[in-house]
């Protein structure tokens, strides 16, 4: 797979629909493997790495939902599954969502909505066009981290990322993977999300019959990450008993599945992340010192969002533009007053909280202009009390005028004459205002 393209597997036996959808997705920049049977799809999934699997429910050699559940039993990390289903099979699709499927669409579907949903799901998994240094932010702190990753990817086998929850540690890990081994696996595991009783089987895998309920052989995440990058998030939550076993794998590069006897060779880059103070945990005997020094080869601290206001501004505009691309008829805009409120908020949940706030505001806003109420709702009064003016009156009025002109231009698709008519001014006056406000004048002429 090209590191610059998203790749998906389309499982659809209808030749007209399959060919039409495959061609449309290829025009959108995807690499598409179109399979008309589950047998062909199984062979492709075994030999290729996909960002998304789009599957019909009823296929000549089986049911797409059963196929998905069978894959889950073999592998703990699959790309997102998007099902295409007839109206009568919605209950089955909902059941699959509860078992881990990403989403479903009912036939017949709007091609534009379908493509937007596919883009959203595919970009959330593995390397894509969004895996760039800008994906970390534009602040000097994040740019320094981004600039260090290509060199670290050439020489470093172990990396420790620390920082508050939601600051973007997994994004840093994915960018490291992009530079180090872009076509090899990237396996992410949240240690805090796995019950202690299941952790060993998740990490090491097991043989059929290893314990009650082990109906088939299953690879662990160590095996799945072979040749690529293993990202252990919240490593500070790993039990001491498992820390010993992790250290052994890192030292010997071998493991044995639960219930097995065969030594299996594994080799991967390890990235660990935590929001806790690991050194203090070592001193408190809550984390093994030998493992600490094994994973603490290179340490990168990801600063909280409140320490990098440039990133707040950039991420807000980025998330709004993402929404606008997915919902072009519901475009949203941000004015300088709302932006100032966002800059003054502490964002304890960091980038994760900011992303959810933007999505919520875009969905719930009654109009195209995003206000502070759309972001903060009932907590607006408390938030507003923290805001202090940081602009002169003239700068503030210019920012408001710039936002309003840009909103009008966007609404009129950049057409100067129509925009001027909407504003009740001449085309020349509009041009002069844009030049005064340093606005982009793409492919337009003053006369």
Image (cartoon, rainbow, N blue to C red):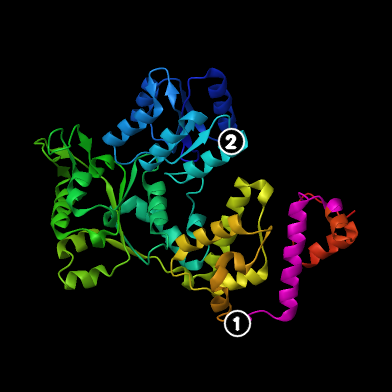
Q: Position of residue 252 (x, y in %)?
A: 14, 47
User: Is residue 309 placed above or below 417 in the rendered structure?
Assistant: below
Is residue 39 visible to the viewer in this orientation of the structure? Answer: yes
- Give the labeled residue for mark 1: 388
Number of marks in the rendered image: 2
Callout 2 environment at 10 Å: few (<14), some (14 to 19), or many (20+)?
few
Residue 201 lies in quadrant? top left
Residue 360 lies in quadrant? bottom right
- Tell me the chief SS of the magenta region: helix
Report the residue at 11% width, 36% height from top: 260
Circle 1: element type: loop
Q: Is residue 231 left or right of residue 361?
A: left
Q: Nearer the viewer, residue 292 or 12?
A: 12
Q: Nearer the N terminus, badge 1 or badge 2?
A: 2
User: Is residue 400 placed above or below 51 in the rendered structure?
Assistant: below
Q: Is residue 375 left or right of residue 220?
A: right
- Give the labeled residue for mark 2: 28
Q: Nearer the viewer, residue 153 or 34?
A: 34
Question: What's the magenta region?
Answer: 389-418
Magenta run includes residue 393: yes
Q: Position of residue 47 (x, y in %)?
A: 35, 29
Of the two numbered discs 1 and 2 in the rendering, the one whose residue sits closer to the viewer = 1
Report the residue at 42% width, 69% height from top: 303
Mark 1 vs mark 2, CA separation in Å = 45 Å
Callout 1 environment at 10 Å: few (<14), some (14 to 19), or many (20+)?
few
């Amino acid at each position: 797979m090209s590191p610059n393209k998203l790749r998906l597997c389309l499982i659809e036996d209808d030749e007209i629909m399959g060919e039409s959808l495959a061609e449309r997705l290829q025009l959108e920049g995807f690499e598409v493997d179109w399979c008309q049977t589950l047998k062909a799809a199984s062979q492709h999934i075994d030999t290729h790495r996909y960002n998304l699997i789009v599957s019909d429910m009823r296929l000549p050699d089986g049911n797409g939902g059963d196929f998905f559940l069978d894959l889950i039993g073999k592998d703990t990390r699959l790309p997102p599954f998007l099902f295409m289903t007839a109206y009568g099979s919605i209950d089955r699709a909902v059941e699959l969502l509860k078992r881990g499927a990403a989403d479903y669409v009912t036939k017949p579907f709007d091609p534009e909505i379908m493509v937007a949903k596919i883009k959203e799901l595919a970009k959330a998994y593995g390397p894509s066009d969004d895996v760039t240094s800008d994906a970390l932010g534009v602040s000097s702190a994040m740019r320094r981290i981004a600039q260090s990753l290509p060199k670290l990817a050439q020489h470093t086998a172990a990396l420790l990322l620390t920082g508050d929850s939601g600051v973007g540690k997994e994004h840093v890990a994915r960018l490291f993977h992009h530079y180090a081994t872009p076509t090899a696996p990237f396996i992410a595991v949240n240690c805090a999300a796995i019950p202690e009783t299941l952790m060993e089987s998740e990490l090491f895998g097991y043989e059929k019959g290893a314990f009650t309920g082990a109906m088939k052989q299953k690879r662990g995440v160590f095996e799945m990450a072979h040749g690529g990058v293993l990202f252990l998030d919240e490593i500070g939550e790993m039990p001491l008993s498992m820390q010993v076993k992790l250290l052994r794998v890192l030292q010997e590069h071998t493991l044995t599945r639960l219930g097995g006897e065969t030594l299996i060779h594994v080799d991967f880059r390890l990235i660990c992340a935590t929001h806790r103070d690991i050194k203090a945990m070592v001193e408190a005997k809550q984390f093994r010192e030998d493992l600490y020094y094994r994973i603490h080869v290179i340490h990168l601290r990801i600063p909280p969002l409140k320490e990098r206001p440039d990133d707040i501004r950039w991420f807000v505009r980025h998330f709004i533009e993402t929404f606008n691309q997915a919902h072009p008829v519901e475009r949203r805009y941000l004015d300088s007053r709302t932006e100032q409120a966002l800059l003054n908020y502490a964002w304890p949940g960091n980038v994760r909280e900011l992303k959810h706030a933007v999505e919520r505001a875009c969905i719930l806003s009654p109009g195209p202009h995003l206000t502070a109420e759309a972001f903060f709702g009932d907590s607006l009064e408390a938030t507003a009390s923290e805001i202090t003016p940081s602009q002169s009156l003239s700068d503030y009025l210019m920012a408001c005028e710039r936002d309003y002109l840009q909103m009008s231009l966007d609404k009129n698709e950049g057409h100067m004459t129509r925009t001027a008519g909407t504003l009740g001014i001449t085309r020349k006056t509009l041009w002069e205002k844009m030049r005064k406000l340093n606005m982009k004048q793409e492919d337009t002429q003053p006369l």
